[in-house]
Image (cartoon, rainbow, N blue to C red):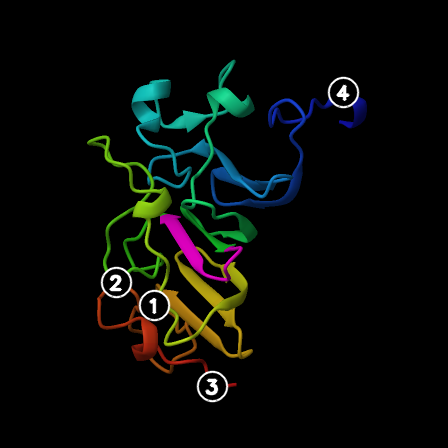
Amino acid sequence: MGDSLPAVDMGSGITAKAIVAGESHTCAILNNSAIKCWGRSNEGQLGLIKATTEFGNFNIGDGANEMGVEANKLAKMGTGRTATAITAGKYHNCAILDNSSIKCWGANATGQLGLGDTNNRGADPDGGDQMGDNLLSVDLGTGRTARGITAGDNQTCAILDNALIKCWGSNTAGQLGLGDIDNRGDNSSEMGDDLHVISL
């Protein structure tokens, strides 16, 4: 440890201002407010197009020349968009962007991305780009934006601009706080105004 432990290569002149870790992946918000992720990408949690074909396996960061700016590309949030906060679940991530919207990517088996389906986002095996402008924002309800975010294994919660809380994803133990054990976010009729706030 100490001076003997080398720093993670973020690229020349690039530093980090926030970092989160999932089960086997890590993401950082860089000093330019872009997002870089590394580790395992089996569910698209790194947000890199065709990561498996570019690097020959699901992992990024376990071999030489896989980090740095050019080798490990950024997880794109959309034209002109930058990140202000980030959280990681087991195999998914969500970020609050500079316009106070939320975008999530990675595993989505229980609706933890909040996009009204169970399709993973972030690494289309057919080479399609699921990130950037093609990655939809989470519908938090009419006029609602986010000011805080956190994730568990397979669920996500946000503090809204009105200081209320909404959660989506896995709910097997009532972790969404909605008085039942039904998942939310895996069906198109479960987000937006249809997703209830938690009663505190």
Badge 3 is on which residue?
Answer: 199
What's the distance in space between the residues labelled 1 and 2, CA to CA? 18 Å
Q: Quadrant of the N terminus?
A: top right
* Mark closest to the chain's N terminus, 4 or 1: 4
Q: Quadrant of residue 186?
A: bottom left
Q: Which residues are magenta?
A: 97-105
Q: Examine the rendered structure and indicate whether residue 127 appears above or below residue 185.
A: above
Callout in the foreground (3, 1)? 3
Given the image, on which type of amino acid does mark 4 rest? Ser
* Mark closest to the chain's N terminus, 3 or 2: 2
Q: Are marks 3 and 1 in contact (CB under 8 Å)?
A: no
Badge 2 is on which residue?
Answer: 116
Rendering coords of residue 52 (x, y %): 32, 25
Badge 1 is on which residue?
Answer: 172
Callout in the foreground (4, 1)? 4
Residue 135, label in figure: none
Badge 4 is on which residue?
Answer: 4
Callout in the foreground (1, 2)? 2
Q: Residue at x 63, y 27 (%)?
A: 8
